Image: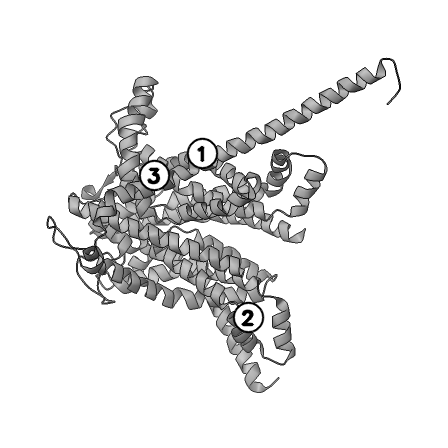
Amino acid sequence: MSAGGIAPSVDTARDAARITRRARRRRRSRFMTAITATATALALVPLVSIVAYLLARGGRALTPTFFTHAPAAAGQAGGGIANAIAGTLLLAAMASALGVPLGIGAGLYLAERRGTRRAATVRYLADVLAGVPSVVFGIAAWQLLVRPVGHFSALAGGLALGALAIPLVARATEAVLHLTPSSLTDAALALGFPRWRTALTVVLRGALPGVATAALIAVARVAGETAPLLFTAFGNQYWSLRPDQPIAALPLQVFSYAMSPDDGWRRQAYGGAVVLVALVALLTLAGRVARRRA
Amino acid sequence: MTATARRGDRVYRLATGACAASIPMLLAFIAWVLATAAWPAFARFGAGFLTTGTWDPVRDAYAVGPALLGTLVTAGLALAVAAPLAVAVAVYSAELAPRVLRTPLAFLIDLLAGIPSVVYGLWGIGVVVPALRDDVGPFLRGTLHLGGLPLFAGPSFGPSVLAGAAVLATMILPFVAAVTREVLLAVPRAQREAAFALGATRWETVIDVVLPYARGGVIGAVMLGLGRALGETIAVALVIGGQHAFASSLLAPGYTLASLAANEFAEASDELHVAALMAAAATLFALTLVVNAVARWLVGRVARRGEAT
């Protein structure tokens, strides 16, 4: 900085300009933060709206009978969704039987051959498959498993859901296995463990809580699907756990009650929806906790 | 290595390979099943199946033009509304929000993204449809005098293409935000630190460094949202009204390919009707396959770049 004369005032002016410019840039940063914060608040409005609406409409439906009884006849009071809960559990079990072992196997494959071209292709196709609309799985299952036998069945529903779960379980398993330190694998192999024992007793064992959570979340997510079940499990007003017969399911029940003109049934639709959202919240929380532990 | 160990390894390799192979096989299998089942309809109606609008089971005439258009319009509208908001939400929750807020926000977004579509549909019937019928429709026509436009002409009964688009926008927003957030988190820290070191503000870091770096992934996330919106079935079926006709008004009921399949399946009795619904499903499958294939490729590119740096 030169001494005396006009120069300092020039510098001050320049400094002032720089300071206002910086202040403007800071202001802009704060302003845009506020804009994105507003967008976030706006995005959360539906969550509040959904929860408030469901509780207001369906809260009263949540009686003990609701969880322990099958539906009452149309127009009659009482009845519940116990058969739908049981049906959803059975469908989820069938979906797990198909989707979890195949998904975990594929996840092991993907994690072990990371970097190979074949694994990259499978990974890519798994993601594409995960993006196929669930209704398409249902329609394909109908063509394959319902149409030839001439009637809807729980088995067809379970298989459709299981197929939906395969890519989800595979990618989640791979992500969890990726966190296992490779030093563990190396140590096991160096001790002379064959690859399969290393994979099953060292890698998978260590990652088991994570893999189990991932599988649970994937199965829960497909169990909340309605579209594939419309064409396969179809729904049932009565108690049935037979795999070769149509079966009730929670999302299906909510869907059909939502369309019904009966007030009592509509209230039960809201009650069922409360149960579904509560399950989702629980599992999302479990997933977060499991991920933090890993 | 002993012979048993080697045999064990071979079995293990075969088993995991078979599991992995189930994924491409499933994809090919679905394509084959749909293509063969849909073939009678495509063979009979040709390209007109996708472009014309008659759906008349009595006269054996089927075409999904309106449903295809409805699919594109609802998904496009939903995306136009949801995508900018979703990116803003992702930017806030991953980059700009105070640190203590980030994890709870991510949880709430995941929660919204995980709510089953039938619940969104139920909420759509009870909240969105009445709001559109009683408030938004009259507002568009009365206050804004847009009733003269074909887009907003006609009475609003409630269930409408606009209601479908609104519910879809609500559903894909958290999904796109969640994927975009993952993409942003995959951007290496060094990129941000370099920008901060040069004196960039938080927002400048986001807009000049993080987002350009993640651009492909963000576009991919938005396209994944598009894929979701195109294929969403139950929520749309509950609020769109179900009508086979080309209607210019967004306030009129309509159809999408997925909701058409869901609604009509129970009534389809003869072979051609079923084949037509199969053809609708095959069209949807092809549409989402292309969108997802491009989207995943874009998302994957960012992830790979993130690993390389």
Residue in the picture at 53% in, 67% down: A109
Secondary structure under the numbered disc 3 in the rendered image: helix
Q: Which residue is mark 3?
A: A49
> Spatial distance from mark 3 to mark 1, Cα to Cα?
22 Å
- Mark 2: amino acid: Val
Chain ID at mark 1 = B
Secondary structure under the numbered disc 2 in the rendered image: helix
- Mark 3: amino acid: Ser
Chain ID at mark 3 = A
> Mark 3 or mark 2, which is nearer the start of the sequence?
3
Mark 2 and mark 3 on one chain? yes
Compared with B192, B249 (above or below) is above
Going by the image, does A283 lie left or right of B16? left
> Spatial distance from mark 1 to mark 2, Cα to Cα?
44 Å
Compared with A27, B210 (above or below) is below
Q: Answer few, some or many: residues within 10 Å of disc 1's Cα (few below 14, many 20 plus, some between 14 and 19).
A: some
Would you say residue B64 is visible in this rendering?
Answer: no
